Image (cartoon, grey):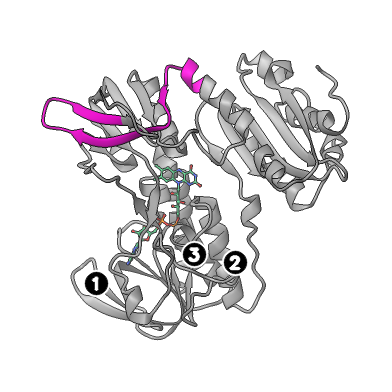
């Protein structure tokens, strides 16, 4: 259906934020329309993000979920309009449909879930051939001999790992002093060492001034971030992974007066309402961690508020995962953050080398680190470098959510032999002593 009758909820964007919000709205009995320009649901995450980057390429899971969920809820419950949405008023969206027509979708509540786009750098034009974004890096037609990654965030390191494993020589150039700045410092150091052992080279505190693509490959002109002598670095392909930027082009936000910050992110209150009543925003297009699971949580909570229920997202407890090998996963505060807050704390650590399962499968690089309040033993942050760290992190996420102490984790019986025992032993090490070291 065109969705021309008034909807309870209209959602612009069918990424993990938007499509999850649409399903939840339908489950709550709201008349819902979802507008998506790409012609395929799943957004950045499914099409050019999390999923293809993880499997290079089994785009199975989210695809299956999105398809399956829409088959179940889609019929009369979620209208799906394929096309580009644009505000004409706070309750009307004009859609240039993929078939070429135009339709107006009306809603009492409109959720902007338009996500984010690749950010370029001054002096660098992305052509998706020699100078690629993460999207182009997912689809290189041959393995580059030399790949230079600009930006040492998780996307650059994941894509660098993929191509490194396939035989490319990887050099990561980063302006800042550290790779993945949101990571705990001690874990980061070990992580960087691990990547270096696998052949990845790092040029930190280094600025890319420009690129020359006139020859066969690419010549990058570099300069120390603090100033100094210029150098030239050669590459076959350059991946620019220097962050993502909120995507609101063509939405006509200014027409209805929706406020954004300097970075172009839409400003919302704790109920995801913008300064314009009835207009909401979720996911990568608002401030907060730019992650698929955070977008999904936003979507559910936003729709719950619209339905008169209470929604809840705690941005301090959103897990972060880097899907290299070993993986790095973390939730809560880093030791540096705790220190900066002036909190007295204890640290407990346990190396995977002392974990029987990790040893048995000969995959024992990494550690678990727990930061807890010195006085109360309340867990403040958990940081894991391990194979499957992205799975191991969730008992800690629950612990954090329930204000657990490290002793609470330590006293829970963990199955043997599992890597989860390393979490238990790190918890023991936090308030007392571990057993196996
Ligand atoms: P998006 O997924 O960007 O979806 C927005 C959708 O809105 C798009 O489909 C777009 O076509 C549509 N749209 C935009 N404007 C309009 C309009 N005007 N009309 C109609 N439709 C419109 N996150 C993780 O949590 N884990 C990961 O492992 C991970 N890996 C990543 C790897 C890569 C290479 C990249 C690029 C990102 C990765 N991310 C990962 C981040 C994740 O993809 C995003 O956080 C997530 O997709 C944000 O969801 P969203 O719904 O806010 O926006």
- In the image, taking residue 252 as reference, residue 205 lies left or right, namely right
The residue beneath circle 3 is 282
Q: Quadrant of the N terminus?
A: bottom left
- Residue at 57 percent across and 26 percent down: it is 189
Q: Give the range drawn in magenta.
A: 194-222
Q: Position of residue 173 (x, y in %)?
A: 37, 30
Q: Where is residue 155 in the image (x, y as percent from the top left)?
A: 43, 38
How crowded pointer 2 is (Cα within 10 Å; few <14, some 14-19, many 20+) is rated as many
First in sequence: mark 3 or mark 2? Answer: 3
- Tell me where residue 135 sits by quadrant: top left
The residue beneath circle 2 is 301
- In the image, taking residue 349 as reference, residue 321 lies left or right, namely left
First in sequence: mark 3 or mark 1? Answer: 1
Secondary structure state at the residue bearing disc 2:
helix
- Residue at 66 percent across and 39 percent down: it is 336
Q: In which quarter of the image is the C terminus?
A: top right
Which circle marks residue 96 in the picture? Answer: 1
> Distance from label 3 to label 2 (Cα)?
9 Å
Secondary structure state at the residue bearing disc 1:
strand
Is residue 270 among what the camera can see?
yes
Confirm if mark 3 falls within 8 A of ligand 1.
Answer: yes
First in sequence: mark 1 or mark 2? Answer: 1
Q: Where is residue 313 in the image (x, y as percent from the top left)?
A: 63, 61
- Tell me where residue 24 sits by quadrant: bottom right
Q: Is 253 part of what is drawn in magenta?
A: no
Confirm if mark 1 falls within 8 A of ligand 1.
Answer: no
Establish if 34 lies above or below 235: below
> Distance from label 3 to label 1 (Cα)?
22 Å
Establish if 137 lies above or below 351: below
How crowded pointer 3 is (Cα within 10 Å; few <14, some 14-19, many 20+) is rated as many
Is residue 88 among what the camera can see?
no
Secondary structure state at the residue bearing disc 3:
loop
């Amino acid at each position: 259906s065109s969705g021309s009758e008034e909807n309870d909820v209209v959602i612009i964007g069918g990424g993990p934020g938007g499509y999850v919000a649409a399903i939840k709205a339908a489950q709550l009995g709201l008349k819902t329309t979802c507008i998506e320009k790409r012609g395929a649901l799943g957004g950045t995450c499914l099409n050019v993000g999390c999923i293809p980057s993880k499997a290079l390429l089994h785009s199975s899971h989210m695809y299956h979920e999105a398809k399956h969920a829409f088959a179940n809820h889609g019929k009369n419950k979620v209208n799906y309009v394929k096309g580009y949405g644009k505000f004409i008023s706070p309750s009307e969206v004009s859609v240039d449909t993929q078939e070429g027509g135009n339709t107006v979708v009306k809603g009492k509540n409109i959720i902007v879930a338009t996500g984010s786009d690749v950010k370029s750098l001054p002096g660098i034009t992305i052509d998706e051939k020699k100078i690629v974004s993460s999207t182009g890096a997912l689809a290189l037609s041959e393995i580059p001999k030399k790949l230079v990654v600009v930006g040492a965030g998780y996307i650059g390191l994941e894509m660098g790992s993929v191509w490194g494993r396939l035989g490319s020589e990887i050099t990561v150039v980063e302006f800042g002093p550290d790779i993945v700045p949101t990571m705990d410092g001690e874990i980061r150091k070990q992580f960087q060492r691990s990547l270096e052992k696998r052949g990845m080279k790092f040029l930190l505190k280094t600025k890319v001034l420009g690129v020359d693509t006139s020859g066969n490959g690419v010549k990058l002109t570099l300069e120390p971030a603090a100033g100094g002598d210029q150098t030239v670095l050669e590459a076959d392909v350059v991946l620019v992974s220097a962050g993502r930027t909120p995507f609101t082009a063509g939405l006509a936000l200014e027409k209805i007066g929706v406020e954004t910050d300097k970075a172009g992110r839409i400003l919302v209150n704790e109920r995801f309402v913008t300064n314009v009543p009835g207009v909401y925003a979720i996911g990568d297009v608002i401030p907060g961690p730019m992650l698929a699971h955070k977008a999904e949580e936003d979507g559910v909570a936003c729709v719950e508020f619209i339905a008169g229920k209470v929604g809840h997202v705690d941005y301090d407890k959103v897990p972060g995962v880097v899907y290299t090998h070993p993986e790095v996963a973390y939730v809560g505060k880093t030791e540096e953050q705790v220190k900066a807050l002036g909190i007295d704390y204890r640290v407990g650590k346990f190396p995977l080398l002392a974990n029987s399962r990790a040893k048995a499968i000969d995959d024992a690089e990494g550690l678990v680190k727990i930061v807890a309040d010195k006085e109360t033993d309340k867990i403040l942050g958990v940081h894991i470098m391990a194979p499957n760290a992205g799975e191991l992190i969730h008992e800690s996420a629950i612990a954090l959510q329930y204000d657990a102490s490290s002793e609470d984790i330590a006293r829970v019986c963990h199955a043997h032999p599992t890597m989860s025992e390393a979490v238990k032993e790190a918890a023991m090490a936090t308030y007392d002593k571990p057993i196996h070291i």
